[in-house]
Image (spheres, rainbow, N blue to C red):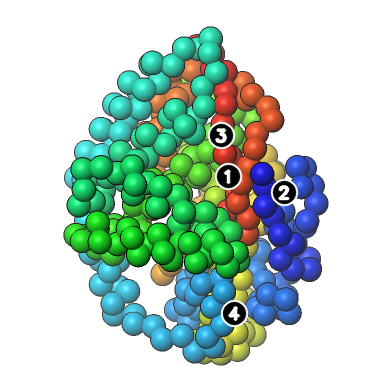
Amino acid sequence: MTVCPHLATGPAWDNGGQDGIFRLRVAQPYFDAQLDGWVLSRYADVTAAFHSPQLVVVGSTNKERNPQVDEAARLRMRAETREALSSVKLRSWRKQMLQHARELVAQFDHKQPVDLIRDYAQPLCLELAVLATGPDTVSVRDLTALAAQVSLAAAEPLDAELKSQSKAATAELRPFFTRGPEPLRESGFVALSQTLVSLLGNAWFALASYPQEWRRLHAQPLLVARGVEELQRFAGLTRLLFRRALADINLNGISIRKGERVVLCLVAANRDPERYPDAHELSVMRTRIGHVNLGAGLHACVGAPLVRVAAIATTMALVEHFSTVELIEPIEWRGGSGFISPIALPILPSL
């Protein structure tokens, strides 16, 4: 079931369309009274917001006008995470993940349906989550169930009940993750075992919907890295992010006052026709991609290199082995204002 509440009214919001999926579209910046914040959906405005040191990260329900920010601690955490995600480790994990992905794909019968979520993405992403975060337990089944509760709240952050369940699940997860930088503890386990699965599900749904692009990657696997970037642009996971202004700022001509909230519409920015020719078409040959799916500038996702390693390895194994796939409709979706992703992704592959 797709849960897509009508968050606001205004140029950036569209509560109609195929399958009733709540969509975001590019519009001029404006202040939305219901969201109590500036809504930015153009690529140029969203990237400017990511690069602004005066806009700080806040939660979707945060109402604090003057959030306290420990910038030194944030920078220290980012440096520790980058060190933990060294190029040596990333190469090792990529090699291991690609090998296991190829082994898994080879077991699929091309005459039988395969669920790319349950049978492929979930086991591979869970393996990577354990490798990267090192939980203090030999059994991860219970951890995975708790992580799924946290992920549900991330998909629909405005649901108070889900938020409460997520808070309790996070408290249960935390004691099992005692080593490494903060982003590679319980939050990293959730991101890699759950959120990454959803990201891959969106990407592969899009790729399967454009069989000519799948066939292109099958014929030219060296294009996969570029293709993954285009898939993130076209079918990126995160829909909305929230910021708060620490001071009065002028952002691309928008006068934002201290304490005001800013809503970043990533899905819309990634489809901005001012930035991307044929923005609503998928093309793995696209150049100058530069999507905002993983942030940018001061607020680029510190785990982005690991996300790219996983997406490239898992997608590479799929397109190498199968010349194309056929989606088995209908596809069921879940999520909300945070992100939407397939519950399952059944396909019939062809060699």
Mark 3 Cα-neighbour bin, 10 Å: few <14, some 14–19, many ≥20: some
| Disc nearer the start of the sequence (1/4) | 4
**Residue linked to disc 1:** 341
Foreground mark, 1 or 4, reads 1
| Disc nearer the start of the sequence (4/2) | 2
**Residue linked to disc 4:** 261
Measured along the vertical axis of the image, is residue 95 above or below residue 49?
above
Cα–Cα span, label 2 and label 3: 17 Å
CB atoms of marks 3 and 4 within 8 Å? no
Measured along the vertical axis of the image, is residue 294 above or below residue 138?
below
Q: What SS does tag 4 mark? A: strand
Name the spot of residue 192 as percent of width and height, x first. Answer: 38, 48
Cα–Cα span, label 3 and label 4: 35 Å
Confirm whether residue 20 shows in the render. yes
**Label 1 sits on what residue type?**
Ser
Q: Nearer the viewer, residue 221 or 242?
A: 242
Q: What SS does tag 3 mark? A: loop
Cα–Cα span, label 1 and label 3: 9 Å
| Disc nearer the start of the sequence (3/4) | 4
Name the spot of residue 152 as percent of width and height, x first. Answer: 52, 54
Confirm whether residue 285 shows in the render. no
Mark 2 Cα-neighbour bin, 10 Å: few <14, some 14–19, many ≥20: some
**Residue linked to disc 3:** 344
Name the spot of residue 6 as percent of width and height, x first. Answer: 74, 62
**Residue linked to disc 2:** 21
Q: Residue at x 38, y 16 (%)?
A: 106
Q: Residue at x 55, y 55 (%)?
A: 155
CB atoms of marks 1 and 3 within 8 Å? no
> Left or right: 70 with respect to 120?
left
Q: What SS does tag 1 mark? A: strand
